[in-house]
Each structure stands twice: as C-alpha cells, then as structure tokens.
Image (cartoon, rainbow, N blue to C red):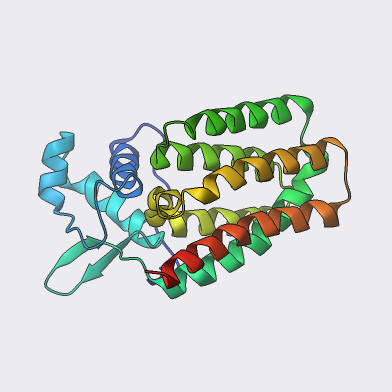
Amino acid sequence: MTETVAGPSAAPAGSKSEQAYQSVKARIVEGNYTPGYRLVLGSIAKDLGFSVVPVREAIRRLEAEGLVTFERNVGATVAGIDPTEYLYTMQTLSIVEGAATALSAPLIDAVAIARARAVNQEMRECLDHFDPVRFTQLNQDFHSVLFEHCPNPHILDLVHRGWNRLASLRSSTFRFVPGRAHESVDEHENLLKLIESEAGPDSIEKAARLHRSATLDAYLAQARNI
C-alpha cells in the first residue's frame, strides 16, 4: 500500500464532497467495501444522489490516506491488506501515539477522564454480545480522548496518519483476535489510572506503547497459526 505524499485538502464540512468522503470511508472501514472492491464513481454518485465530481474528490482524498488505490485499466479499488505495511504502521503508531498520550496527559481534565471511562464502559458492555465494528469505533473514540490534547501538532498529525492507514483493517482486527478485546479494556482502565494519578510521562508513554504493541503481537501470533 502506497501513500500519496501530497493529497487534496479536506472539503468544507457539510459539502457534497465531504459527505461522499465520509460515506465511502465508512463503507470501507465497516467492511462493506472489501479489499479489491472496485469503486465505480458513477454508481456511487447515483447511490448518493450526487454528481460524479464530489465523489471523484472524495476518492482522491481516500487515495491520499492509503485506503484506495488506482490500477491501470481497472480504476479505483479498495486497497488490500499488506501484512508488512500493517506491521510497520502498528510499530510506528505505538511510538507516536505513546508520545502523544504522554504529552496530552497533563492537559486531560476530569471531564475528559470521565468521558473516556464512559466509552471504556461501553466497550466492556460490548464484550457480552461482541460487535467488532462497534468495539473498534469505541476504541478509536477512547484513544482520541487521550491523544487529541497533544500540544505538538507534528506528532498529532503522525498519529492521525497512522489511524487513517489502519482504517481499512480496523473493522476486522478485533474480529480476528477477539480475546484481545478483553485485555484491551483492562489496559484502558490502567492508562486512565496512570493519568489520574499524574504518573510520570515515561510511565504513561510506556503503558500506551505496550498497549498498542500487544494488539500487534496478538494479531501476528494469530496470523502465524492460520
């Protein structure tokens, strides 16, 4: 999977281009558009009730994020899962998200902690009747609370790029390693307790990095057994 160096900028909120982008991205993330699925602009535009122009702009943005590729004589297709790319992305994300979380920690107030804990409780309840797509969305919501306060915009940008790169696989990660979901919820609570107790940045960064790398380890271990 290749990443376009300079992609188009985000469309204005509420615009047809933005709506098309959000709609197609959601279908990719949720698994409705699987890897290799051909994205026919005319069909998508008709389905959304738009012209082809905003759909084309949306597809270009998704290509820049690595979720869509263009193939000669084929056109736009949903990007496939490259195990090596997944490995490198998760390794990188464990580093940059760990740093972002540690830098965010002093800026996370009680209201944000309560919001994160409420999301984690929803994740815990989701375990009883496991819905990997819902669980994955809640997982992103939880981590967003922890890293979005990062005062370093460059590190935060790298975190967003990492999550975008993983978007096409996020819906299936916990489906592939469901046992990891239980451990993840417990590790979330541990992260919150570290932040609440004003633990040192090194401790918080290490916990966040190990949390991310543990998911990678579980995924790779499962892949080797297939």
Q: In this view, does 158 lie to the left or right of 72?
A: right
Total number of numbered labels? Answer: 0
Residue 18, x across and y down, in percent: 35, 40
Residue 66, x across and y down, in percent: 38, 63
The quadrant the N terminus occupies is bottom left
Q: In this view, does 126 lie to the left or right of 104?
A: left
The front one of 148 and 209 is: 209
Q: Farthest residue toward the front?
A: 225
Q: What's the residue at 60%, 46% (across, down)? A: 184
Classify 199 as above or below 89: above
Q: What's the residue at 60%, 61% (across, down)? A: 93
Residue 109, x across and y down, in percent: 78, 30
The front one of 1 and 5 is: 1
Let me know if residue 12 appears in the view: no
Classify 26 as above or below 6: above
The front one of 127 and 35 is: 127
Classify 83 as above or below 155: below
Q: Is residue 219 left or right of residue 188?
A: left
Let me know if residue 76 appears in the view: yes
Q: What's the residue at 61%, 59% (across, down)? A: 214
Residue 76, x across and y down, in percent: 21, 62
Classify 198 as above or below 84: above
The front one of 6 and 69 is: 69
Q: In this view, does 118 lie to the left or right of 61?
A: right
Residue 62: quadrant of the picture: bottom left
The quadrant the C terminus occupies is bottom left
Q: What's the residue at 70%, 53% (across, down)? A: 208
